[in-house]
Amino acid sequence: MPEARPFSTDDAQLEPIAAKVLAGERLNFDDGLALYGSPDVLAVGWLANYVREKMHGDVAYFNVNRHINPTNVCVAACRLCAFGRKKGAEGSYTMALEQAWETAASGYSEAVTEFHIVGGLHPDLPLEYFLDLISGLKERFPQVHIKAFTMVEIAFLARRAKLTVPETLRKLKDAGVDSMPGGGAEIFADRVRHIICDHKIDGDEWLETARMVHEAGLKSNATMLYGHIENDEDRVDHLLKLRALQDETHGFQTFIPLAFHPDHTALAHLPKTTGLMDIKQIAVSRLLLDNFPHIKAYWQMMTAKIAQIALRFGADDIDGTVIEEKIYHDAGATTPQGMRRQELMRLITAAGRVPVERDTLYRNVMRSEDSFTVAV
Ligand code: V47
């Protein structure tokens, strides 16, 4: 239910934007800049919360998931990343298939409903390794949804296998991939991308790959990495490009703004994002991405405390139990490794929201002891 409290602000620039939001009208590029530039974070948050409650009422979603990163070996050497290693470098690893399947089974006690699988761009691992990895997981955990490989990994795997992206997607889908995570989008603007992740596919290619994923009948998420060298124009541009693609494909489920963690990266001199920046990012995303069903406050990235507050500033999802996160912890995240269902539910309830356990496709999950069923 939308809030009963009336909207008020001392930022005159927000008045016409509020009128649009209350009338259900789409915001434009300049509106996005005005939202980012506004000193009245509470008013921006009020508007985002209005939209969020209109879409989802008091519900806040979470899931029970496990991350698997089969390799950190990566040819890309992105300045933003503390996870990737060159082949043979100290700290580099690549899981044997048995090891990856064993990893999947560890920490399984809460009946995981999703495996989130991403990794480096390995120069030698063939597509068959990934197909075997996925089909082996499906064989062992047939009820678990497999959300695997970013647009960057898919484009890389296709190129290495000398296949088209649709051909590669067909093989991954046949092996058991059910949907795709949102990583690798970073910031689409070339100027920024050249500095933070020069060796990755460019923004247009990321969007084109996402289009092909959706055309293949797979849902995906989308992300934006903020809090490094980008400016407000770059962020608005990024969000509006995602919105334009979503108008065409309707294949995105969830948008996840990702706060840059500088530790142990080549950009370690940059300051960390602040709590207010994180909160505002959630709110602006909710307001600009009017065609995205869900906005996720990823607690591992923004801390559980900020993610909880974000549930009143536009977010309707807090991600999951996240057993074994590596990418953020290599870059200095101090959040705990994994959180139990009960604790996630306590955080959500204390934010005045109603916790709903979802599967990756946002169907309700019903539990008994260590098993689950999904509402269809
Ligand atoms: O693509 C890498 C980012 C992403 C750093 O789809 C960094 O449900 C901050 O995409 N500081 C991977 N960010 C994580 C990701 C994700 C996470 C949770 C849920 C979902 C989903 C997707 O992490 C990368 C990159 O954008 N990243 N290094 C860093 N130092």
Image (spheres, grey):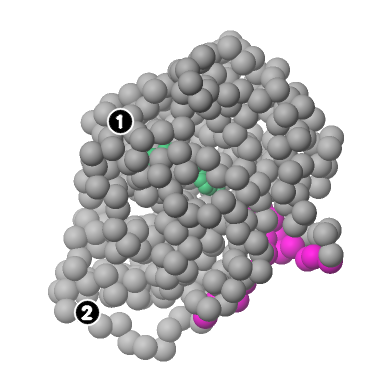
The residue tagged with tag 1: helix, strand or loop? loop
Kindly identify which residue carries mark 1. Answer: 266
Please report the residue visible at 75 percent of the width from the left and 57 percent of the height from the top: 110
Mark 2 residue's CB less than 8 Å from ligand 1: no
Coordinates of residue 100 in the picture (x, y in percent): 71, 31
The image quarter in which residue 22 lies:
bottom left
Q: Height in image: 251 above or below 165?
A: below
Coordinates of residue 346 in the picture (x, y in percent): 59, 74
* Label 1 packing within 10 angstroms: few (<14), some (14-19), many (20+): some
Which mark, residue 373?
Answer: none
Coordinates of residue 106 in the picture (x, y in percent): 74, 44
Tag 1: residue type? Ala
Please report the residue visible at 48 percent of the width from the left and 21 percent of the height from the top: 90
The residue tagged with tag 2: helix, strand or loop? loop
Between residue 135 and residue 265, name the one nearer to us: 265
- Total numbered labels placed on residues in the image: 2
Magenta residues span: 352-368
Coordinates of residue 188 in the picture (x, y in percent): 34, 36
Please report the residue visible at 59 percent of the width from the left and 66 percent of the height from the top: 344
Tag 2: residue type? Thr
Which mark, residue 9?
Answer: 2
Camera sees residue 254:
yes
Q: Is residue 371 left or right of residue 106?
A: right
* Quadrant of the frame with the C terminus: bottom right
The image quarter in which residue 154 lies:
top right
Which mark is first along the chain, 2 or 1? Answer: 2
The image quarter in which residue 62 lies:
bottom right
Rounded to the nearest angstrom, the CA distance separating label 1 from label 2 is 40 Å
